[in-house]
Amino acid sequence: MSDKKSSQLRDYEIPIGDSYKLDARKKLGSGAFGDIYLGANFKYNEDVAIKLEPTHTKHPQLFYESKLYMALQGGIGIPKLYWCGSQGNYNILIIDLLGHSLEDLFTYCKRKYSLLTTLMLVDQMLSRIEFIHSRNFIHRDVKPDNFLMGRGTKKHQVYAIDFGLAKRYRDPRTGLHIPYKDGKSLTGTARYASINTHLGIEQARRDDIEALGYILVYFMKGNLPWQGLKARNIKEKYEKIKEKKISTSLDTLCQGLPDEFKRFIQYARDLKFEDRPDYSYLKNIIRQICEKNQLNFNYNKYDWILKKEQAYEEQKEQKEQREKMQKENKNNKNNDSNEDKKKNSEDSNKKNNDQEDN
Ligand SMILES: Nc1ncnc2c1ncn2[C@@H]1O[C@H](COP(=O)(O)OP(=O)(O)O)[C@@H](O)[C@H]1O
Ligand SMILES: [Mg+2]
């Protein structure tokens, strides 16, 4: 790096490669394998996200993840990959800076999404998954934390991230599907894992879709029946989640929700190992729910946007009220002091008159 650049750096900034700097004050997130920081490009001062992984980690995966980003470049809702390399004790991946995750926004929205927001999100998540599948990969960790909203002109768009657990499910040249296998340990996140994943069966496209089905319910209800189960260790916990998932009927799981939710999950569960999910069929289910409930997609109406607007309006109203009260107080004071002045001048006139009388 040139001296010119290093002299431009502030004490909390760390140069990365030739073109980037990391802002050590601004951690964007920390995952199972490392941390993500805010960074910027020297030349254009454009913001980026910088994912770090210690080089001596037991199971390095960042370079693998960078390969996935390469394979997926150009897709809608896939962050751009800028740079990947090693520096000091870290493997480093630099991608587009994005907005909040769907999990963070869920918490911001008091852990419930409206039907419209749920459908607008799941529809886009389905498109991302379809695209990843079209490039011969399955994600294998479909969950709200791994889908982020964009920023600026892309703030209405859902992005897919975190490809550390993704896997190629078919040969890009021959189209040959990976073989069926069982006895596998759970890869991904137990809460959203498909029943077959719990049963140790090799994951395929169908399992990404089933996870999305559980997310539909999670977004609407705020939780899933297999959350918060008590267990002594992680193995027992996974076992309990599996049992609860198997024993909960779809009627119970989807109680109070549009019937189509059941159809979505049932469809995913009925898929065979090598089946290509019918993404259009699933999108149609989403469209039908919209029609039945007289909802229209409108990306200015995400719950968090409405909530922010509402908070803004409330603040504005409070401010106006405060100002009005201050004005009234001032007027009252002025009136009081005018009265006082009037009284004072009357007194002094009287005094003067008295004096003159003397
Ligand atoms: N490009 C990005 N822009 C903004 N925040 C990000 C970005 N990438 C990751 N994050 C934040 O960091 C968290 C962890 O990132 P992720 O890539 O999922 O790591 P892990 O593999 O450890 O889960 C995300 O859930 C998100 O909150
Ligand atoms: Mg993640």
Image (cartoon, rainbow, N blue to C red):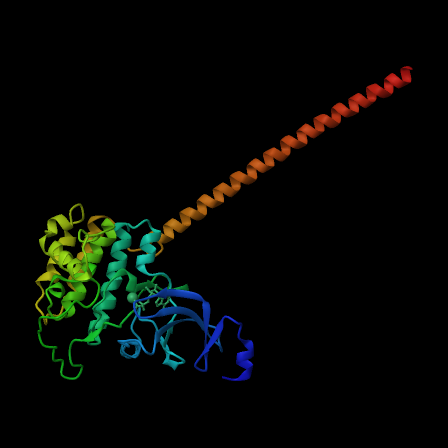
In percent of width and height, residue 165 lies at 23, 72
Q: Is residue 51 above or below residue 320?
A: below
Is residue 146 shown left or right of residue 184?
Answer: right
Image location (x, y in percent) of residue 329? 60, 33
Can residue 283 be seen? no
Residue 298 found in image quarter:
bottom left
Residue furthest front as drawn? 232
**Place of residue 103 in the rendered image (x, y in percent of width and height, measured from the top left):** 30, 58
Instruction: Choose between 79 and 246: the one closer to the eye.
Output: 246
Residue reaching furthest top?
357
Q: Nearer the viewer, residue 190 or 109?
A: 190
> Is residue 277 depicted above or below 59 in this figure?
above
The answer to whether residue 226 of the structure is visible from this angle is yes
Q: Residue at x 8, y 62 (%)?
A: 270
Viewer-proximal residue among 138 and 154: 138
Instruction: Say left or right for 342 vs 265.
Output: right
Which residue sits at x=29%, y=62%?
A: 145
Q: Is residue 135 above or below residue 313?
A: below
Residue at 75 percent across and 25 percent down: it is 342
Ligand 1 is in which quadrant of the figure?
bottom left
